[in-house]
Amino acid sequence: MTPQTKPSLSSRSLDRLLPVMLLPIAFIALGPVARLLLEGIGFGDGFTTEHLTTVLARPSTGTALKHSLITAGGGTLLSVLIGSTFAYLVALTDIRGKGALVFCLMIPMMIPPQITALAWMQMAGPSSTILKVLELAPPLGSPQPLHSPGGIILLLGIQHASLVFLTLRAGLRMIPADLVEAARMSGASSLRVWTQTVLPLSMPSLIAGSAMAFVTALGNFGIPAMLGIPAGYATLPTLIYQRLVGMGPSVLPEVAVLSLVIGTVAIIGVLLSRYVLSQRGFGLVGLSGTPLALNLGASRRPVEIGLWAFIFVILALPLLALCATSLIPAYGVTLTFSNATLEAWKEVLLTQPVTRRAYANSLMLATGAAAVLLVVSMPLAWLMERRSSHLTRLLDALIDLPYALPGVVLSIACILAFINLPFTDLTLYGTIWIILLAYLARFFVVMLRPIQASIAQLDPAMEEAAASVGAHLGRRLRDIILPLAAPSAAAGAILVFLTAVNELTVSALLWSSGTETLGVVIYNLEDSGETVMASALAMSIVLLIVGLMGLVQAGADKFPKGVIPWQS
Amino acid sequence: MAELEFSNVSKEFDGVSALQDINAQISSGEFVALLGPSGCGKTTLLRLTAGFEHPTEGEIKLGGNTVASPKTFVPPEDREIGIVFQSYALWPHKSVFGNVAYPLEVRRVPRAEREARVKEALSLTGLNALGERMPAQLSGGQRQRVALARCLVFDPSAVLLDEPLANLDLALRASMHEVFSMFHRRTKATMLYVTHDQGEALALADRVAVMEAGRIRQFAAPEVLYREPVDCFVAGFVGDGAVVSARVTGRSENNSLILNVLGQEVLSRSATTEPSHVSIRPEAITLSNDAPLRARVISCTYLGGRFRLTLDTAGETLVAFSMHRAAIGETVGLKLHDLWAFRDPDADVVTMRSLTNA
């Protein structure tokens, strides 16, 4: 048998074609952000700092910035407190039921913030159904205590605690067990081990987790919108929302500057944490992997009870309140066994055209984003891992940006980029496509990273073996890479779906009549006083999300390590 | 079955040279081992042959056709070369049958013929009963056999093996030697076998290319490498024994050289008239109490049937076999015979000095 000397067309043309894929991806993922930066310096009307100076000089900008820093800062402190307590206890001690505990702690992060806010509002205040049942409700007319900076801080803190928890626990896993054993052999008590060995070693991940919580809190729209707007307490994201909704696209240059302000604060936060990290990096040497399990002894049971009680208060109680509200016939009525009704559920899920449309839109957007990203990420991840070039490395470094930047920033960026399609009179603004494009840009990394991780773990010899037996690139991708990366890709797709269904911030600025998403409809229902229907809709979404999370959890042992965020 | 030809092949990775000026011809059906310490370039040469790397310079021909040169490059999938990886690289999502059938699926071989050929390959490698298993359920030796069957099934013109036994235990290695020999007899494929284990190379190959620092130092049959190494590296790397510097003092009637080795006049075979070193294999030393060359015993290990002695004489360490245990520190007499003298390319300076001294 003699080898063919003529170069095979199919494999080589595909090899040349793949890098071309990078261009549209880079355009969709990074184009809007680049366009936003240009807008800040007056792109289109010549270089000008006019927008910059007028917006920055306005007192409302300063106030909103101050409010943003206060709520995000306070929320971060609370997140660190909750997240690190859980992380240290789960990662280092012998408490039981860790898996269930972690799963429950993850739920607040996966539930859309406006649903969290809605649920907590049903737990406090004069109209709280659950307080009425317990006859603990404050008199009518007394203020809702959560409509305050304190309320925003509390909910931001709870919502993002899991970010601190996950980063810190991943860091704690890296601490070699023999370091702790060595400390104990030297005669240190559990507490000393923690303060003198574990705490300093885990400081980098604690700082990294705090930075993530801060940036996410800064960009959070749902919570300050639900709690801050009624109290007249505006943060930068809600200020942008109010401007844009109130005045329309004419204020685009102005809100572009505002979103640049948030983006700048977020980037300063990240850079600051990187700087602090670089000052105190430790090279950890030793074997990790053996999970630490410091013996809590007699205090194990009280600690377990404490943790579960906390989970009950931050998760079960608000959801119970939300559920209770969804069952009453009209807002303000006290829930009894005789008047409990599924009327609101029926109305929201079956009758109301807006909610049905929103369900359809959200599911379509989430499925569409997950599907498109799945198809694109597979070859792209392969390209980045196996045909690494300057271009792929640059894309690799920048692709985090649309996800890391606050959602408001990305939304404004997308409006600017797609309001006038180049060379045409078409606009995507007001259509569902702009939301889809924004989702594609925003959730790209959520899909890409797990696939990248699983391809990186594949022995390159797998592909070389296929090549040597005669399989061309296309077949290798289809027969070898695709099936082996499929579990991670599935997990990535479900994560994209979950995050996209949750999404409010981006769609809040991009929706128009007919393209509402679930997040938007909940916000609008609550805003117009339809709290009971909002609760029913919110409850149905919570059930959907917990169900999907359970599905991912059920397949946990099929995915490579690190694919499921709450099991990293 | 096809011959393999390397002309002036060089390979650089980011400016660092990995292979220099490789020239070699491997005939059709020959079993060649690439032997050398880690980092010597043997795996790079294998990967160039497979088509996973592009040569920086030079040309590789397979069956008379150029597969890699500055102008042409045939990708691995079009070379009809089978490869067995050190990690086996079985596809974990395919069964044993699926793994072995894949090369035929890619070639669109009809189902009936495909099944027959897979069954034949499986039975040749002793895997008949394991077709339905997944790779994860196999032992190391079984995985190795699957990798071989996957090569065997599509009748490649050449088969490359990259340290295929490195992950197996000693007992399995011996049995796999037989499998490889059977495989070679059966397919008559040209085989290129990378290893750092000289025992494997000498036992299996028709010819062995000894490599060091990106070059082929010697390319010859195992017995030639052992008896007639071309330089100090090959003499030291292949086989047991010692390399000692030597000086020519004369020539005997039957054309062998008379050398001064360790202060003694000895006869030596050689391919050159100006050797710088001799290779002294353990078989070339006879222990004799009245011999003038005296040595001190440094160590004595029992090999089963005989003892291996390391001996110190005039600062050189020699290796000899003995039927009797020797006490450490004891002095013994040595007779040297049937030595091989060669000129080491790096030894020019030494020879120049010894010439001026003479």
Image (cartoon, coloured by chain):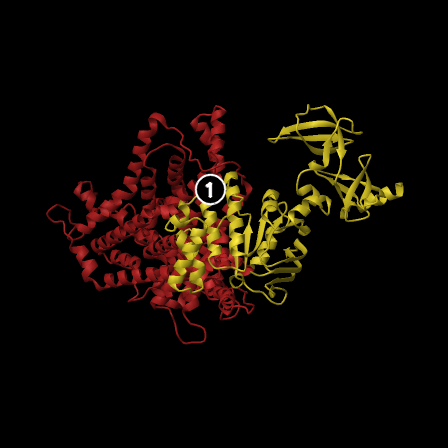
Chain colours: A red, B yellow
Q: Looking at the image, which is closer to me, A474 or A527? A: A474
Q: Looking at the image, which is closer to me, A55 or A220? A: A220
Tag 1 residue: A205
Q: In the displayed structure, does residue A402 sit left or right of residue A337? A: right
Q: Is residue B200 visible?
A: yes
Q: In the displayed structure, does residue A371 sit left or right of residue A173? A: left
Q: In the displayed structure, does residue A535 sit left or right of residue A511? A: left
Amino acid at dot 1: Ser
Residue B191: horizontal and vertical position, in percent? 57, 54
Residue A503: horizontal and vertical position, in percent? 34, 56
Query: Residue pushed farthest front?
Result: B254
Circle 1 chain:
A
Q: Residue at x 40, y 62 (%)?
A: B113
Please rate how many residues cluster around mark 1, counting C-alpha atoms within 10 Å: few if below 14, some from 14 to 19, many from 20. many
In the depicted structure, whether residue A385 falls above or below residue B261: below
Q: Secondary structure at mark 1?
A: helix
Image quadrant where one finds the C terminus of chain A: top left
Q: Looking at the image, which is closer to me, B133 or A284? A: B133
Residue B350: horizontal and vertical position, in percent? 81, 43
Q: Residue at x 30, y 48 (%)?
A: A550
Q: Is residue A409 visible?
A: no
Q: Looking at the image, which is closer to me, A88 or B101? A: B101
Residue A23: horizontal and vertical position, in percent? 49, 66
In the rendered picture of this protein, how many numbered marks are placed on residues?
A: 1
